[in-house]
Structures are given as structure tokens and as C-alpha cells.
Amino acid sequence: MEVVGEAASAAEAVELARKLQYDVVFLDVEMPGATGLEAAPHVRERRDPPAVVFVTAHAEYAVDAFAVEAFDYLLKPVDPDRLARVVERLHERTQENAAPVEKVAVVVGGGTELLDHDQIHYVQAEGDYSRVHTYDRAYLSTVSLGELEERLGSRFARIHRSYLVNLAKVSGVRRAADRFRLQLADAQRTELDVSRRQSREVRERLGL
């Protein structure tokens, strides 16, 4: 990794972003003037928007961070192992961006429709196939959940053996006994349980 610029405020970051070529922006949330959450859309105003990783001492901003399409969310003091995992995923993202853009093919009537990854809120296993859910519709995909997990990349998280969720579409978190549940920003306000096995990773990804 190479540091190509540093800024002490949101305004400075936005100004710097117009002059530099960069792949990733590490943003604090609470900064002089505008917040990092307000600055994020501006530093991503490019044809090939960079990844944004928030680094903050405040866990309560996690949901807002993913609402502005954050790549990840690190809590201070930053754990070196956690940072290393984020950097590794950023490296994988760079490799993915160098490859042709992929879409997900779904069955519509007697034909096929192609969905952008950003349209997908979550994917549900359906035997050897899967059910792809967008804001207000569900489509059948002839690709298995495991295969889609590989294709969709790091923005998606496996929360259960039967569910894959777009973390950018998570609008809330609810506690349910000894586990927790994600609320999505789709038309039905879908809620999905996170399995105990996936709980730790999902909590880390959401900064909980």
C-alpha cells in the first residue's frame, strides 16, 4: 500500500480527492466541519469509485456508514489483525475491479434478466438454485448460493447457510435472545437471523 495523501478535515479530503488517483479512502467520522459520513459520497464521485473504510471510536455510526456504501468499518483502537484482514479484502477488491464487470442472471418469464450487484438486497438458497431478492421483487437464479457468494464479492456476507446479504442494504440490527437479526432496507423491511457460527464475522463487518 502507498499513502498518496492525508487530510485533516472533510473539506480538505474532498479537495484532495479531486487531485489524486487513489483506490481506497480511510475516513474518520467525526472531523472538523462536515463529518466523514457527509464527505464519503464526494470522495467517491468518480467513474471507478474508491472503497471507503471508516475508522472511528464510535460503533453507533456503523449502520449509517454502510448506508453510504462503506467497504468496512474499523473501531479505534484499531486491532492490527482486523486491519490486516481489511487490507487483504481491499487487495481482492482491486483484483476484482480489474476483471470484467459481472451481473447476475435471473429467470423472468420465459427469458433472462441481468441484475447489477447493487440491486440485490439478499439471496436465499433454494435447493441447487437460489432466490435473488431486490428492493421489491424476487427472482429465481439457476446458480447455487455458494457460487453466488464467490461471484458477488466482499460487500456481501454469508449470515446463515441459507442466506447471503448485501451489507450496504442493512438498515438496522435487532437482538433476539442469544443471537441477533438484520433488518434490510427493502420494501418489506425483511428481517433475517444471523447464525451463531457467522455471528462474530458479521458483527465485525458491521462494527458492532
Image (cartoon, rainbow, N blue to C red):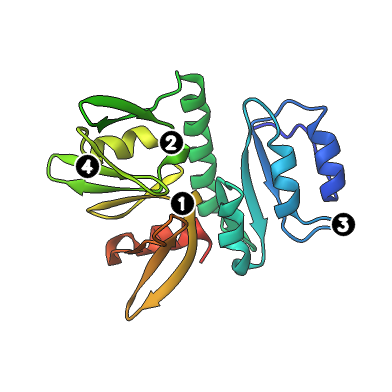
Of the residues under marks 4 and 3, which one precedes in the sequence?
Answer: 3
Where does residue 197 sit, x and y in percent of width and height? Answer: 28, 62
Identified by mark 1, the residue type is: Leu
Q: What distance separates the C-alpha of mark 4 from that of mark 1?
A: 18 Å
Residue at 54 percent of width and 41 percent of height: 87
- Which corner quadrant holds the N terminus? top right
Identify the residue shown where x is 43% and y is 56%.
Answer: 187
Q: Nearer the viewer, mark 2 or mark 1?
A: 2
Q: Which comes sooner in the sequence, label 1 or label 3?
A: 3
Residue at mark 2 to residue at mark 1: CA–CA distance: 12 Å
Residue 20's image quarter? top right
Residue bearing mark 4: 130
Residue receiving disc 1: 167
Q: Where does label 2 land, which residue? A: 117
Q: Position of residue 48 (x, y in %)?
A: 62, 26
Q: Which residue is mark 3?
A: 33
Which one is in front, 125 or 160? 125
Is 47 situated above or below 166? above
Pointer 4 or 2: first along the chain? 2
